[in-house]
Image (spheres, helix red, strand yellow):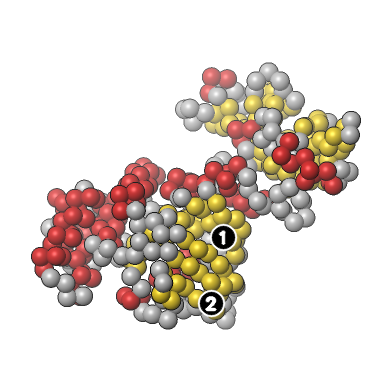
């Protein structure tokens, strides 16, 4: 295990602006599982590849433990990387693929066999050691790629969108496998994905990147409940947050948010921040579960579409000219075209400055 530190790391490309990173500072603690997440082109894979030594830095330094590594070759950095496409040698058996790096390093054969057997046991692929990659399923190939990283016993594990080639069911299974493996090894892990569900379920800490800079970082709960910007609020959560234009007014000397003809109480923890916005426009954020059908309806809206998902129903409707989504109990049996009365859960509203996108 080891700490990882990125100090003012920058990466520029002469012909493209995508993946350009400027002044990135990030400290990852020993044993921590950190997920870098963001849309395509935000710089997350570039950042991972710079840590791995597969991309050169334009500026800054990278430290692993007490060593500066940005000038070292990848093999000298004490890292192991699991790629999106598995990168297995088709002519080698599972055991040979897993042991390839150790054999190149000249490790004793008995030690290699012990490491391969131990990793195969942990990953439940012991029965597959003599097979070749073409005889394996996608999930099995991913386990082999993970085993190849494990046997090296590295200071840091790097995962570059390792589940993107799997179907939805396998992705769910492999998320659980990766989390279980991390808890067992307690290894420093940096994981890149564009899938915010993976980020929320795997991470000790999520780092949201946007255009090569850190938009916000924190626990999955912190980012979900207290997004610092509209970008984070819209990126974290599925279905995505609803954003609606509103006005801050004073009612009896107390700031409230006016949404159409309805006045909505401001969450107490945001009262001081919004006091200066009286008479100004804001943008409010409501997650689908923040709309309730509890008989206290403030809004009556026609249902455009209802999606029954088993434990919940996603109800799509238009409010103040904006297409919105509410997550309601399936027993309501909501039907398309009918009117639905909705209420906003008390204290659950996010409020953003419409010009800067910062949360108030």
Residue 131 visible in the picture: no
Could you tell me residue 8's position as x and y percent? 56, 73
* 12 in relation to 24, above or below: below
* 32 in relation to 63, above or below: above
The residue indicated by pointer 2 is 60
At x 46%, y 78%, the residue is 56
* 336 in relation to 202, above or below: above
At x 77%, y 55%, the residue is 355
The residue indicated by pointer 1 is 209
Could you tell me residue 342's position as x and y percent? 69, 26
Q: Is residue 22 left or right of residue 127?
A: right
Characterize the local packing of mark 2: few (<14), some (14-19) or many (20 or more) Cα atoms within 10 angstroms: some
Q: Tell which of 144 and 204 is nearer to you.
A: 204
Q: Tell which of 285 and 265 is nearer to you.
A: 265
Q: Is residue 223 left or right of residue 94?
A: right
Could you tell me residue 152's position as x and y percent? 26, 65
Number of marks drawn: 2
Q: Quadrant of residue 107?
A: bottom left
Asked which secondary structure carries label 2, the reply is strand
**Mark 2 or mark 1, which is nearer the start of the sequence?**
2
Q: Tell which of 20 and 92 is nearer to you.
A: 20
Could you tell me residue 131's position as x and y percent? 15, 57
Q: Quadrant of residue 317?
A: top right
What's the CA distance linking mark 1 and mark 2? Answer: 18 Å
Q: Quadrant of residue 301?
A: top right
At x 47%, y 73%, the residue is 62
């Amino acid at each position: 295990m080891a700490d990882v530190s990125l100090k003012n790391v920058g990466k520029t490309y002469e012909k493209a602006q995508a993946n350009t990173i400027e002044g990135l500072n990030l400290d990852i603690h020993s044993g921590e599982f950190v997920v870098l997440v963001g849309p395509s082109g935000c710089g997350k894979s570039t950042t991972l590849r710079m840590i791995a030594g597969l991309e050169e830095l334009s500026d800054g330094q990278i430290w692993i433990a007490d060593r500066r590594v940005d000038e070292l070759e990848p093999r000298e950095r004490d890292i192991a990387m699991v790629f999106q496409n598995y990168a297995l040698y088709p002519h080698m058996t599972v055991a040979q693929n897993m042991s390839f790096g150790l054999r190149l390093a000249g490790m004793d054969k008995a030690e290699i066999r012990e490491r391969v057997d131990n990793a195969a046991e942990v990953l439940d692929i012991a029965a597959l050691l003599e097979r070749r990659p073409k005889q394996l399923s996608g999930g099995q190939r991913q386990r082999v790629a993970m085993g190849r990283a494990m046997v090296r016993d590295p200071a840091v594990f790097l995962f570059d969108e390792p589940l993107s080639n799997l179907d939805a069911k396998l992705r769910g299974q492999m998320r659980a496998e990766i989390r279980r493996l991390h808890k067992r090894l307690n290894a420093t892990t940096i994981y890149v994905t564009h899938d915010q569900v993976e980020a929320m379920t795997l991470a000790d800490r999520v780092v949201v990147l946007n255009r090569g800079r850190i938009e916000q970082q924190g626990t999955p709960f912190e980012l979900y409940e207290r997004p610092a910007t509209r970008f984070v609020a819209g990126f974290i959560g599925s279905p995505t947050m609803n954003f609606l234009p509103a006005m801050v007014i004073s009612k009896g000397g107390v700031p409230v948010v006016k949404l159409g003809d309805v006045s909505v109480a401001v969450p107490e923890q945001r009262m001081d921040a919004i006091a200066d916005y009286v008479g100004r426009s804001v943008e409010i954020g409501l997650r689908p579960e923040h709309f309730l059908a509890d008989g206290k309806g403030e809004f009556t809206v026609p249902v455009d579409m209802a999606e029954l998902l088993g434990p919940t129903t996603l109800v799509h409707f238009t409010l103040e000219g904006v297409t919105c989504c509410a997550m309601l109990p399936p027993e309501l049996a909501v039907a398309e075209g009918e009117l639905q009365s909705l209420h906003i859960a008390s204290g659950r509203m996010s409020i953003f400055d419409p010009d800067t996108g910062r949360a108030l």
